[in-house]
Image: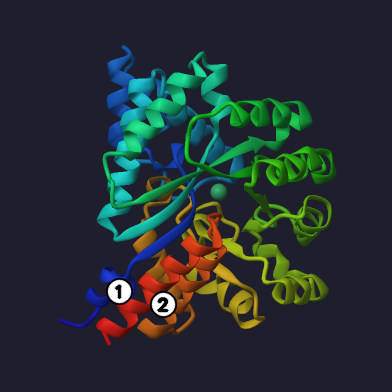
Amino acid sequence: MAPDPHRLSTRGHALPKIELHVHLEGAITPALAACLARRHGHEPDEVLMLEDGAYPARYDGFDHFLRTFLATSAQVRTPEDLAEVAAGFATGQAEQGIVHTEVTFTAATHIEAGMEPHAMWAALRDGFAAAPDVEVGLIVDVVRDGGPAAAAHTVRLVEQADAPIVGLGLSGSEGSVPEGEFTLLRTAADRLGLGLTVHAGETGDAGNVRAAVDELGADRIGHGIATIDDEELTRRLATAQIPLEVCPSSNVALRLTPTLDTHPLPRLHGAGLTVVIGSDDPPFFATTFSDELAHAQRLLALDDDGLADLQVAAARAAFVPAARREQLVAAVEQWRRRSA
Ligand SMILES: [Zn+2]
C-alpha cells in the first residue's frame, strides 16, 4: 500500500515528540463534552454547539469558533470533570508518542465559574498522572479582552498554584486591548522563572507580533503567521530565533488561509524563522498533533530527518531548564540514529 502523505510514517510515529501549542479545554472531544453535559443534567444539543455530534468542520470566523469552544469549556463544572479532561488530554498525547507537552489552560474561566483554586490545581495534577510517560507543563493564559485586571488576577492565581506551571500566555481577541497594557505579564514571568507566549499575528496583522516582541519580550509567538507580511520583522525574528507556534489545520478551519496547500508555513520556514508545530484545539479542527506534523512534513517536503529537525526546534523552544531541553534533543537524536 502506498504511504498516505497526510499521515506520519511508521517511523515517524515512533519519533519522541514535543508539542508546545495546544489548549486543554480545546482538547475536549465532543463525546467527553456530551458526557459532562449529561452528568450535570443538560441535553448536549441544548448547551453544546455540535453538528451531528461533532464540532463544525470549518468555522464562520473566529467568533463562531470561540462560541463553540466556550460552550464546551463551560461543561467543566467540578474538579472531577477537570481531572477527567486532563487525563483524557495526557493519555491522548501519550498515544502519539509525545514525551513533553506544554498545554495552555485558562484558569480564570474555571475560577469565575466557582471552582476552588486548590481543588482545580489538584485535579490537573491527578489527571496528568494518568499518563506518567508524558511530561506536562502548564501555560496559564490570560484572555486579553479582560485587560490588565484579568492579567493581574491570573498572575495571583499562578503565584499561589501548586501545579507544574512553565509559562504564562496571552490570548483572546487580537487588538481588543493593546499588548503594551500587559507588561505585568513579562515582569511576572521573569520573577517566577516562567516563559511567556503571546497569541499574535493569527487573526491580526504583523503589527501585533511586533508589539508582542517589542513591548512584552515574548519568548514565543502563538501562530504568528502574519509575520511573513513584514520583511523587517521576519528578519528580526529569524535572527533572534523567536519561535512561531504554527498550527496549520487551525488556520484553515478558521478560514485564515483557504487550504493547507496555500498555508504560509513553507514561506515562514523558508525565511529562516524558527517554526514549531502545534494542534491548537485538535478535536475542534478534526486533527491531532501527529496529523499536524504530517502536514508540515508534506508542505515543507521534509524527509524523516527534517521531521526530527522540527522536533529538535520544539525541544529547544520548550519552557523547561536548559538541561531538560538538551535531554529532549538527545531523545530525538537517539531516534534519528536508531531508526536510520
Ligand atoms: Zn492557540
Residue 30 versus residue 218 in the image, above or below: above
CB atoms at circles 2 and 1 under 8 Å apart? yes
In this view, the residue in front, 242 or 252, is 242
Residue beneath the point at 66% across and 26% down? 156
Please give the label number shown on residue 307.
2
Relative to 81, say whether 262 is above or below.
below
Q: Read off the residue under disc 1.
A: 12
In the image, residue 133 lies at what x, y percent? 29, 52
Q: Quadrant of the N terminus?
A: bottom left
What's under tag 1, amino acid-wise?
Gly
Which residue reaches farthest left?
Answer: 1
Q: Nearer the viewer, residue 137 or 204?
A: 137
Q: Which mark is residue 44?
A: none
Going 40% across and 23% down the picture, which residue do you hit?
75
Q: At label 2, which amino acid type do we have?
A: Leu
Find the distance from the CA under tag 2 to the CA under tag 1: 8 Å
Q: Is residue 259 above or below residue 321?
A: below
Is residue 196 at least partly visible in the picture? Answer: yes
Quarter occupied by residue 148: top right
State whether residue 298 appears in this view.
no
Q: Which secondary structure lies at badge 2?
A: helix
Mark 1, residues whose alpha carbon is within 10 Å: few (<14), some, or many (≥20)? many
- Residue drawn 80% across the image and 42% down it: 183
**Which residue: 55% across, 72% down?**
262
Is 262 located above or below residue 285 in the figure?
A: below
List x then y, in percent, for residue 93.
Answer: 33, 52
Q: Residue furthest front?
A: 323
Q: Give the image location of residue 316, x and y in percent.
A: 54, 67
Pointer 2 or 1: first along the chain:
1
